[in-house]
Image: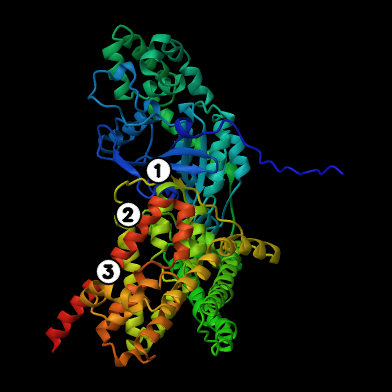
Amino acid sequence: MKKTTTEFTIPLNTPLFRGDRRLRIALVGLPGAGKSTLFDAVSSTAPHSGELTGTHRVYAECKVKIGFDEASVVDLPSIHTLHHLAGDESSGANDYAALKYLLWGDKRPPVTAHEQPGPPAPFASPDLIVQVVDATSLQNHLELTLELSQLGRPMVIALNRMDEALKKGQTINVKALEKLLGVPVVPTVALMGQGIAQLFSTAVKTMRAAACPLPQPPSRHIGDSLQQLSAVLNRPELHAAFRVPHPLLVVQFAAADRYFEEELSQHFPQLLPELQALRAAAGLKLPRPLAEELHADRHHRAATLFEAAMRMGLPQETRGWRYWLDELFLHPQWGLIGSLAVFAGVLFVVFEFSGWIDSMTTARLTEALADWQPQSTGGVVGRAVVDGLIGLVGIVVPYMIPLVLLLVALEEMGLMHRIAFVVDRGFHKIGLHGGVAVPFLLGLGCNVPAISGAAKATSGRERVIASVLITFVPCSARSAIILAIAGKYLGAVGVFGIFALTLILIAVMGRLLSRGDRELGPGQVQEIPPYALPTWRVLLTETWERTSDILTIVTPLLVGGSVVLALLNHVGADSFINTLLMPVTVWWLGLPLALGVPLLFGVLRKELSLLMIYQALGTQEIGTLLDWIQIVTLLLFLTFYIPCVSTFAVMLKTIGRKEALISVALSVGVALLVSGVTRVLLHAVELLVT
């Protein structure tokens, strides 16, 4: 019987905007619209910045990933208006510099050949404009919308601060506004990440459709008065010299824009008197000066659009649980508290619930086999294999599976996406995006699935940095050692100090690793999904996918590591290894000679380090043989030393041999440096106190 296979295909929209074909998007808006907030929400870890030519106004630019597409997004300085630029010298010069970029980018037109060298900006003019509009003061922003529509470029409106508008009882008919302007309008709350993914997805669709705004000409009485002026300005040589859309050229000259008039006087002096005469004649047909009439007309048309789209009502009173959850998890300040609450919940699962499962599974297996102490080589190997499998159970059953299930559930509920958005700017400080928050939390259970998760969420150099930093996240095994020893001999202050030092080290390492290449990768448009209840099918499928590497990578290494360690003990190689490691253990770390083997072979199975330390010292009361400085030194070395050979194997698979070996060298170097220097400092403090 012939087998049939079902093929699943994902529709691919073309053309793809990637590489040299990536989109150029300019964020434009009045002051206070939320433009920079929107840019920060999608920007890369280190955006480029500079000044527009002729001003001290700073722009920011970075690459952003939008699904399969890419875009160069530019956050322009705020623009007040494209007209009446000569009226206010302070804001007018800045507005005009932004207009030059929107028109010409890095390619000056012939009329600007005599100006100072250098284009308005070091990159091309935008393919598409995203105007960020404050929904709470819509009418003022619509005047700028009417002006931007004269540029003849595809445009999308980000109707920002919609939450504040609803609180004030303002209801905006988005569909009506879209129809009147011929421009896609996307409601957003940039501060809380809402609508941003839809905004950039709409921008890409608009660009593929090459849809430009509907023409927004002046009112009929003004248009009639400008007909003759428009006809004279509609000359090929003028358009070639200025390279601006004809409607914009007409309005700029009609409004007596100083820049355009000066350029006409320099390049077309024979034509200027006729144009000035036509402008004066057009003004005679109007009830007020032409420039004032143009401004009043824009104001009137914006008010008409506002009235057609806005409905006033009572302030919004009904706030459901979704609203309050978003207030907790997406608010710039409260969101950090919500993220810390989730972090605390994860710690509870790792150290309380998982600890109870460990006592019911691994501890009982270990107790049941405690009397089996074979002396023959075959028996030693057999016991080592069993110990390796018990160690596997000790990692997977109590720590890994519950933690992964919890994090998958939080993702499916939509909480982890909100946490990733809130912590995104914090992760930018270490060269990463907030999307790696989940792998970092997963690292508290085990670094193996955490690195696999980071490999899926990142690419390129960001993947390497994330993988290296995750190796410094204390997994459940290292955390158990810290809690067992520091909790007993150093107290709560000691435990907190070690974990705090770990966070500081991760932050410092991230800054150093990302320092060499400031823009590590493109920005990301993070989607904020609706809240949803997870299904068991998704939970189990995702958990299996994230933990399946245990069977293929971790199991043979754990079993093999146990066999190697058992054989070394069986043939009595301990003393030889301890002697070789004397410069590290005794001279640099100030620890007993017998701890050489536990420190070295803790890399095979980190959870065995504590047991090996007890065996090497001959007692579980190590406080009788080690002083508090030695205990701190020992814990710091175990915390920052290579997590385990399984972690190294996963890094080989995800980031390559060279980077994995560098990570191992870095881990060993950091462990030796931090623990050794801390020991010296603590001894110095002890001498000063005594």
Against 495, residue 164 (above or below) is above
Which quadrant of the structure image shows residue 243? top left
Q: Quadrant of the C terminus?
A: bottom left
Above or below for 540 versus 45: below
302 relative to 318 in the view: left or right: left
Nearer-the-camera pick, 189 or 463: 463
Contact between marks 3 and 1 (CB within 8 A): the answer is no
Nearer to me, 377 or 139: 377
- Front position among marks 3 and 1: 3
Q: Which residue does the image show at 39% across and 9% down from the upper left? A: 237
Q: Residue drawn 38% across and 52% down?
A: 659
Q: Which residue is outermost to the front?
A: 376
Q: Position of residue 119 (x, y in %)?
A: 30, 27
Res 209 seen here: yes
Residue behind mark 2:
513
Residue beneath the point at 43% across and 23% down: 248
Amino acid residing under circle 3:
Leu
**Which element carries disc 3, helix, strand or loop?**
helix
For marks 1 and 2 on the same chain, the one whose residue lies earlier in the sequence: 1
Q: Please, what is the three-letter code of the amino acid marked with disc 2?
A: Leu
Give the residue pinned by disc 1: 30
**Can residue 143 be seen here?**
no
Q: Is residue 505 left or right of residue 644?
A: left
Q: Give how far across and how far down residue 643 sits, in percent.
A: 41, 68
Q: Which residue is nearer to you in this view: 479 or 648?
A: 648
SS at mark 2 in the image = helix
Q: Earlier in the sequence, mark 2 or mark 3?
A: 2
Q: Read off the residue under disc 3.
A: 672
Determine whether 134 is above or below 671 in the image.
above
